[in-house]
Image (cartoon, grey):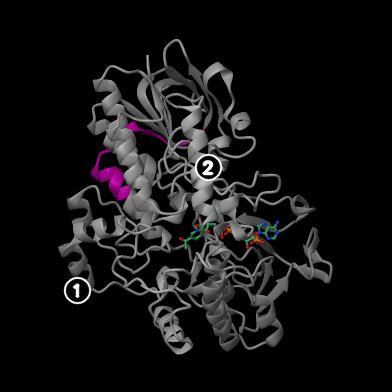
């Protein structure tokens, strides 16, 4: 690979990188995918923690671009577990003969745009390569957040991060385990670790809302029905704000327009169905605080009814807007706190003082542990982009350009960085949607754009400053009309000390996709094409 020139270099071999390769190769480009892991799968390669499972239903969280693929692949459960998704992505790599253009165990460390040739000089752990187009398919949640907790490196037991889980798995039997973090990852892992470990202590900073996933095997009939009208299902999903959930009935009224009994019945029905559509019960749950509070209170009542110990109940009570941080889906999370071997520590009342050689010391005392599991999330959306030292025109560093927060046009292009595309970048719907739907839309847009550039003899495309300025204002305005910016979420970068607080994803897939389509149709408005 070293020293070679490609039409496009794609960084990352998850859902985005694999489809990008397939699509660009079909367009006749020479493409190389560079992946730091020793397998494909992206986030599904790294997140092997116990209980790792997708929170979008398997028949929807899958590629739609190839009819034979979606007909042939048989999902076994309503929500696919990590091993099954990883098998699926390996199957995709086999099926479309992708391996021959993928280099594994190659980390991309830097990239510099050469204005004389309109090409990127890419530095990798396997040597330099050049490419006209640099496509970052690095994922939104792939840079692990390892918090700077005093004494962590002095701990003599194991320290694990859910997003960097050992490939060989971990046997917790007989161990005293501490889990820090109660987001989606912690909430999935905790019930499973609790069943095996001798003792489990959960260190919670912010109580989360979680609704039951109600995972189950998929019945053959159900799968047959989906496959019989698969393209309709995909098309219907693309018309929804999150790009999924068209098989469930969406609410049509405000939560405040119905009487309390009808409202309760609507929440209860969705609680029993399980899944994210809980927040679709009414039209205004993420827009109106009073409406939101009715859903929040319903979940709090469920916690009171499920957990036996009143002190634990009190600690588990979430207070922020429900859905402001991403809603979690669980399988027996609240019930886990009724087990005699599970203890909850509220870090707001008794913060961690330090990690010692033998455990975690809070202001209340020491918890002796054999293993510490960090379920502390990710430097989301920008972490994996800024890990690469990218320099655009005039040597401008992306890290400098984004010092006050990410600034993109459509979440796809960055002013000052010609021929750089970001798949599901900040400023696009990305993490507020079914990621596969957003990935397919971006991959297809990028591929069509490159095809047009080549056909019309252009060698350079760059988002203009003006277009990016307007886009950032637009994303903020859309986000500000919702309740999303009201809490300390990773959507805002609030989970990483020192990270600029900017709401990064754009709520609402369909209007976004339509804008992308129109911009392309109008000759890539807001982009400068050259030479
Ligand atoms: O990470 P998170 P995650 N001391 O950032 C706590 C996707 N995902 O890996 O809320 C103590 O949500 C932090 O506390 P606080 C999904 O999009 C999907 O769980 O910041 N605690 C929080 O409780 C999800 O949203 C799936 O106060 C600290 C937790 O760690 C995203 O990935 C499964 C701390 C981190 O929660 C991220 O989820 C898993 C510190 N210093 C993930 N630092 C599914 O598909 C952080 N915390 C189901």
How much space separates mark 1 and mark 2, taking CA atoms?
47 Å
- On the rendered structure, is 28 left or right of 424? left
Q: Nearer the viewer, residue 334 or 266?
A: 266
**Labels 1 and 2: the sequence-earlier one:** 1
Q: Which span of residues is magenta-colored? A: 90-107
- On the rendered structure, is 109 left or right of 90? right
Residue at (61% x, 49% y) in the render: 493
Magenta residue check for 75: no
Density class for disc 2 (Cα within 10 Å; few <14, some 14-19, many ≥20) is few
The disc label shown at residue 221, or none: 1
SS for dot 1: helix
Residue bearing mark 2? 473
Q: Position of residue 23 (x, y in %)?
A: 27, 36
Q: Nearer the viewer, residue 112 or 238?
A: 238
- On the rendered structure, is 203 left or right of 514? right
Q: Is residue 66 above or below residue 169?
A: above
């Amino acid at each position: 690979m070293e020293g070679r020139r490609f039409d496009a270099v794609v960084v990352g071999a998850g859902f985005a990188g694999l489809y990008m390769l397939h699509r660009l190769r079909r367009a006749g480009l020479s493409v190389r995918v560079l992946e730091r892991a020793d397998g494909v799968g992206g986030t599904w390669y790294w997140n092997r923690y116990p209980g790792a499972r997708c929170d979008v239903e398997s028949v929807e969280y899958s590629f739609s671009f190839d009819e034979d693929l979606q007909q042939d692949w048989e999902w076994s459960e309503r929500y696919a577990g990590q091993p099954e998704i990883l098998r699926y992505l390996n199957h995709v790599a086999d099926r479309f003969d992708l391996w021959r253009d993928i280099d594994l165990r190659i980390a991309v460390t830097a990239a510099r745009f050469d204005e004389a040739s309109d090409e990127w000089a890419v530095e990798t752990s396997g040597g330099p390569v050049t490419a006209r187009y640099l496509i970052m398919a690095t994922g939104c949640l792939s840079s692990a957040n390892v918090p700077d907790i005093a004494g962590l490196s002095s701990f003599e037991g194991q320290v694990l991060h859910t997003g960097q889980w050992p490939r060989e798995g971990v046997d917790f039997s007989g161990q005293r385990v501490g889990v820090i973090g109660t987001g989606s990852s912690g909430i999935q892992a905790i019930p499973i670790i609790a069943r095996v470990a001798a003792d489990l202590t959960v260190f919670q900073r912010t109580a989360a809302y979680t609704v039951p996933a109600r995972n189950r095997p998929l019945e053959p009939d159900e799968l047959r029905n989906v496959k019989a009208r698969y393209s309709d299902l995909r098309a219907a999903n693309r018309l929804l704000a999150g790009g999924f959930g068209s098989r469930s009935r969406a609410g049509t009224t405000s939560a405040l327009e119905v009487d309390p009994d009808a409202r309760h019945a609507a929440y209860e029905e969705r609680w029993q169905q399980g899944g994210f559509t809980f927040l679709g019960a009414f039209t205004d749950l993420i827009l109106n605080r009073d409406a939101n509070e009715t859903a929040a209170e319903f979940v709090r009542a469920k916690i009171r009814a499920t957990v036996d110990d009143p002190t634990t109940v009190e600690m588990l009570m979430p207070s922020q807007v429900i859905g402001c941080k991403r809603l979690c889906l669980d399988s027996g999370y609240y019930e886990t706190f009724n087990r005699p071997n599970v203890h909850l520590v509220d870090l707001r009342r008794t913060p961690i003082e330090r990690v010692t050689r033998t455990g975690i010391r809070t202001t209340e005392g020491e918890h002796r542990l054999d293993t510490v599991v960090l379920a502390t999330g990710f430097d989301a959306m920008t972490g994996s982009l800024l890990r690469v030292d990218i320099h655009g025109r005039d040597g401008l560093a992306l890290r400098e350009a984004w010092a006050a927060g990410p600034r993109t046009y459509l979440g796809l292009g960055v002013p000052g960085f010609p021929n750089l595309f970001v798949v599901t970048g900040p400023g696009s719907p990305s993490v507020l949607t079914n990621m596969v739907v957003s990935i397919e839309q971006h991959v297809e847009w990028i591929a069509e754009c490159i095809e047009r550039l080549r056909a019309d003899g252009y060698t350079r495309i760059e988002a203009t400053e003006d277009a990016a300025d307007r886009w950032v204002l637009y994303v903020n305005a859309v986000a500000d009309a919702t309740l999303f910016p009201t809490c300390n979420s990773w959507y805002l970068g609030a989970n990483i000390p020192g990270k600029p607080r900017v709401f990064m994803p754009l709520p609402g897939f369909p209007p976004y996709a339509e804008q992308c389509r129109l911009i392309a149709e109008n000759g890539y408005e807001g982009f400068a094409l050259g030479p």
